[in-house]
Amino acid sequence: MRNPTGDADESALEELLSRPTHAVVEALGTLEGDILVLGAGGKMGPSLARLARRASDAAPVGVRRRVIAVSRYPLGATRDALERDGVDTIAADLLDPAAIAGLPDAPNVVYMVGQKFGTTNDAPRTWAINALLPGLVAQRFSRSNIVAFSTGNVYPLSPASGEGPSETDATGPIGEYACSALARERVLEFCSVRQRTPMVLLRLNYAVEPRYGVLRDLADRIQAGEPVDLGMAKVNLIWQRDANAVALRALAHCAVPPLVLNVTGHPAHPVRWLAEQLGDRLGKTPRFEGVEAQTALLSDATRMIELFGEPDLGIAEMLDVVADWVRRGGRSLGKPTHFEEREGRF
């Protein structure tokens, strides 16, 4: 991820985030039909679309398929870059029913649309995006396999000494965003059973890459000399490409009712330890504030690991990559995770 001048190289990072593993190549080599990615312009969507394109092209039998990335594309550069990399794009506002009706049919749909931040100031829009829109999409693509991103925020805080809730444990969302995320799941579950639409629901918690994520949040605070809040004592982390790889491989596991998967790393790591590790790599001593609570937002990834194996990138490598990126002045997406929020206000 370095260019000849030694600066952070974003094109090399994009290549790394979309480099297909053997398992993804094998999965997409046997998958039939086009892949439609809805909400592809967000933090994870561009690299997922590229990963799907590259894995399809790398399949031994030479799979011919369209990978179609749909987004509003407020930044035209994202759309142009995807087109250059062989991904077809469609600009659409999915809250417009006519736009949904006009989308091409596809046997495989990855649903990445969601709103978290801004909920406190505009809760109705969050509920429309997270609860109304999934039903409209599920009705439009009732004959497709649908893999839909959800969030670990549907769970309550659990003991920081444990592994966190599994998919069979009770949900307990805190705050309007988390409640709307659970509503998204319930609407999709209803449509799956009523229409016999195979689905997988992915409860993600938290994806990491150098431009955003919990590690970037911590690194930025350490670099700026700002204190790290210890209230959320532990977090689960997964490298972004590993999370996207699970999403694409999950297309072969869609079921009625939906298969639910916690998508995250294992085990959870103490925030204090993560900050200290980043501080060592950045040559700075982190400052702390607050006291570690006895509960945290955690998820048990056992089922995901049983299906797909351990994530490819471990925590030491994630720390190395993020610290190196920050040290070299690599760009931030400017989208903090607010992982320390314990009251559900986003």
Image: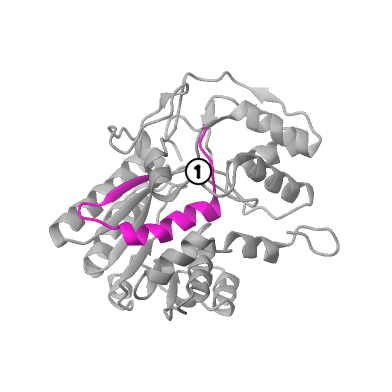
Q: Against 303, is 52 above or below?
A: below
Dot 1, crowdedness within 10 Å: few (<14), some or many (≥20)?
Answer: many
Q: Is residue 334 left or right of residue 126?
A: right
Tally the marks: 1
Residue at the image position 42 percent from the left and 64 percent from the top: 27
Q: Is residue 199 left or right of residue 123?
A: left
Residue 33, given in percent of the width and then of the height, sits at 35, 75
Residue 40 appears in the figure: no
Residue extending furthest left? 194
Picture coordinates of residue 243, whole percent (x, y):
48, 52
Question: Can residue 252 be found in the magenta stretch?
Answer: yes
Task: Give left or right: position of 94 versus 336.
Answer: left
Closer to us: 80 or 200 = 200
- Residue flagged by tag 1: what amino acid is it? Tyr
Q: Nearer the viewer, residue 177 or 240?
A: 240
Q: Dot 1 lies on which element? A: loop
Q: Is residue 267 visible?
A: yes
Task: Provide residue 214's location: percent of width, then percent of height.
Answer: 58, 41
Residue reaching furthest to the right: 5
Asked whether 240 falls inside the magenta stretch, the response is yes
Q: In the image, what residue occupies the spot 42% across and 39% down?
A: 301
For disc 1, the marked residue is: 206
Task: Classify 7 as above or below 96.
Answer: above
Range drawn in magenta: 235-261
Q: Residue at x 21, y 65 (%)?
A: 139
Quarter occupied by residue 193: bottom left
Q: Between residues 65 and 133, which one lies in front from this camera angle?
A: 65
